Amino acid sequence: MKHVIIFGGTGMLAGATKWLTENAEHIFIVGRNKHRLERLRPEHVKNNFQLVTLDYRDNKALKEFLQRTIQTYGPVDLVVSWIHSVAPDAIPIIFGELQDQKQRWRLVHIKGSSHDLSAITDEITVPKNCLYCDVQLGFKIEGSVSRWLTHEEISNGVISSIYYNKRKTVIGTLHPWSKRP
Ligand SMILES: NC(=O)c1ccc[n+]([C@@H]2O[C@H](COP(=O)([O-])OP(=O)(O)OC[C@H]3O[C@@H](n4cnc5c(N)ncnc54)[C@H](OP(=O)(O)O)[C@@H]3O)[C@@H](O)[C@H]2O)c1
């Protein structure tokens, strides 16, 4: 992986972000909070590592960031997106900026919700040059109780989706939906 961008990589995805940092040539980690971003900086900083303070609800800033990074580092290979529904324009903007790339790219789209199953399972239309990898966050049923996923389970599931190039990953289970915590 040459050029990787991760949105929302400082929280529950921190483990996956660390793994990507070790495996990508150029990685851009996007978030709003500088301190949370800084916590991901490796001890021995390589050239490939950049923290980007950006609010993905800011459409203009998001477009400018994508244009700048493509201009500087060339085509993007992988976008990992943990983008909440408060930013409905963000994914269409990413598609718009990457759809003319000659090189194919991969979107690992992580979707989770505590109340809306359709927000997790709905499919989206992607540009022709995009290989879409769907990661659906469910919950775990252990005996008679259920619980939400741990950060480690979520990060490991995302790493597995990237490593094995899986088109669809369900971490935990989504059924029966009524059994969620
Ligand atoms: N199925 C499940 O088990 C499941 C599903 C979903 C969530 N959860 C749990 O719920 C917890 C909360 O989830 P969460 O998504 O709120 O927390 P999170 O993953 O800990 O943090 C959200 C990530 O998105 C970034 N972010 C949020 N808004 C942004 C914006 N407008 N612009 C740019 N970056 C933005 C945050 O960075 P900044 O704050 O720096 O912007 C952070 O990197 C998680 O810790 C997880 O354990 C569980």
Image (cartoon, rainbow, N blue to C red):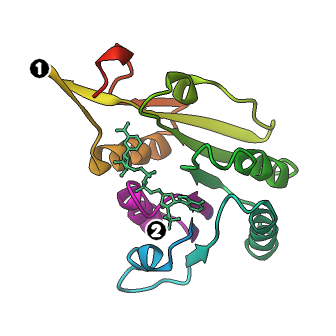
Q: Residue at x 54, y 49 (%)?
A: 82
Q: Is mark 1 within 8 Å of ligand 1?
A: no
| Vertical placement of residue 7 versus 157, above or below | below
**Of the residues shown, which amino acid type is indicated by label 1?**
Gly
N-terminal-most mark, 1 or 2 = 2
Query: Which stretch is magenta?
Result: 4-28
Left or right: 79 as drawn, with respect to 150: right
- Displayed quadrant of residue 57: bottom right
The N terminus - image quarter = bottom right
Return the residue at label 2. 21
**Of 133 and 86, the residue lying toward us:** 86
Mark whose residue sits in front, 1 or 2: 1
The C terminus - image quarter = top left
Residue placed farthest to the right in the image?
Answer: 100
Q: Position of residue 111 (x, y in %)?
A: 52, 37
Element type at mark 2: helix
**Label 1 crowd bin: few (<14), some (14–19), many (20+), radius 10 Å:** few
Q: Position of residue 20 (x, y in %)?
A: 46, 61
Distance of mark 1 from mark 2, alpha carbons? 37 Å
**Of 163 and 6, the residue lying toward us:** 6
Q: Is residue 1 visible?
A: no
Tag 1 and tag 2, C-beta contact below 8 Å: no
